[in-house]
Image (cartoon, helix red, strand yellow):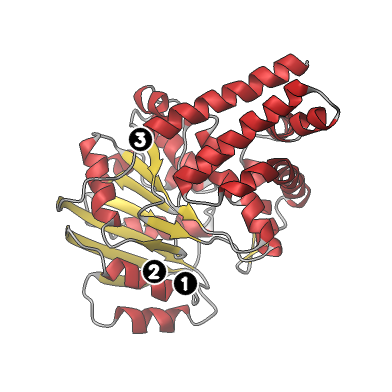
Amino acid sequence: MRFALFVLCYLVLVIALINFFTIRTPRNKSMTSKSVTVLLPVRNEQNNVGACVAGLMAQKDVKQLQVIIINDQSTDNTAEVLSEAIGVDSRFTVIQSQGPREGWLGKVSALQTGFERSTGEVIICLDADVRLAPDAIARSVNQLEDLSLDFISPYPRQLAGTFSEKLIQPLLHWSWMSTVILRLAEKVPHRSTAVANGQFFLIRTSALHAIDGFASVSKKILDDVELARSLITAGYKGVVSEGSGIAHTRMYTNFNEIRQGYGKSLHKAFGGALGAIVASLFIAATGIAPLLLALDGYFIGLVAYLCIAFTRVLSAIRSRSNPLYAFLHPLSAALLIYLIAYSWAKRGSIQWKGRTV
């Protein structure tokens, strides 16, 4: 059993090493000839949307840019902040949503509303808390074109301020970097290896039209990964790329926000109760058991712990986060297992931005 645990940790390290040296990074900074529509759904984002709009206004080397902002019944000052930030810039359109369509979740409904008004050849789904470098869109669209892909998700850098953020947020990047061989998933796409992040997600308009827009994910909490799966099922190809050099975000600012944010979605992340149990066992086996074995005097446990810690260091280097937190991975793993259990216990009852999800 101890040797099997070591083999599992070693395989995780091998995958992380392969991805560390082969992950795609948006590098082409030339002018893109493709017309682009950014879909920006917002709900109670008065503290974020101004800076997000400023980042979009600063985009360069994009020949035709259309930005559609869908204000999803915000009850704060989002509308006022938007009006002041946009001014008279004709590239921006604000749609005042009347609420989710029947049977749809709010964010996905807002995206569909914006998509129906879009004119670009490439659609970009963007979250309001994402900050883009001035060449982020051009480099990302060029990567989509250069690789002849149908969708691509440049993964933003996940900023973390509090201790709980620093324990949990790096796991977002690490979770796919250490479990999915990205180049293989790109060449031989399969639903089970789909990786995407709705914070910054590019899709060819033709591909999105072919799957009837966002209809296939109308009720999906994890709409980004599910949308990638729908595209793959329809025969389209895409991949996640390293976007930490062109985009960053801070999703949460305290532990309560982390618990509520992950609480609304983690119960949907693994395909059901059995998947959640298997995922929790994997997290415990690679994150907690090696340290326990090492503390019990088993050298193989120490080696397994160092293998996993090194995967976290590799992920931290790529995602521009603090590598020292790699050595607290057992604590991160225990916290993630707690969040999975919390999500299952509270499923369907989490309050998020004034709505129950």
Task: Mark yes or no: residue 265 visible.
Answer: no
Left or right of 266 in this view: 73: left
Q: Which mark is residue 152?
A: none
Q: CA distance from mark 3 to mark 1?
A: 29 Å
Percent x, y of residue 353: 60, 67
**Of residues 294 and 279, which is closer to you in this image?**
294
Point out the tag, 3 or 1, that comes first from the N-terminus: 1
Q: Quadrant of the C terminus?
A: bottom right
Residue placed under numbered mark 2 in the picture: 52
Query: Tag 3, which secondary structure?
Result: strand
Place residue 230 in its image quadrant: top left
Q: CA distance from mark 2 to mark 3?
A: 25 Å
Left or right of 61 in this view: 15: right
Outermost residue toward the right?
Answer: 296
- Kindly identify the residue that appears in the image at 71 percent across and 21 percent down: 5
Left or right of 211 in this view: 284: right
Neighbour class for label 3 at 10 Å: few (<14), some, many (≥20)? Answer: many
Residue placed under numbered mark 1 in the picture: 48
**Of residues 355 and 82, which is closer to you in this image?**
82
Would you say the residues marked 2 and 1 are in contact, meaning their CB atoms lie under 8 Å apart? yes
- Kindly identify the residue that appears in the image at 50 percent across and 35 percent down: 177
Point out the tag, 2 or 3, that comes first from the N-terminus: 2
Amino acid type assigned to the residue bearing label 1 in the image? Asn
Neighbour class for label 2 at 10 Å: few (<14), some, many (≥20)? Answer: many
Would you say the residues marked 3 and 1 are in contact, meaning their CB atoms lie under 8 Å apart? no
Residue placed under numbered mark 3 in the picture: 238
Query: Tag 1, which secondary structure?
Result: loop
Percent x, y of residue 257: 66, 63
Percent x, y of residue 321: 52, 51
Up the image or down, 202 lies above or below 88; here it is above
Place residue 84 in its image quadrant: bottom left
Query: Tag 2, which secondary structure?
Result: helix
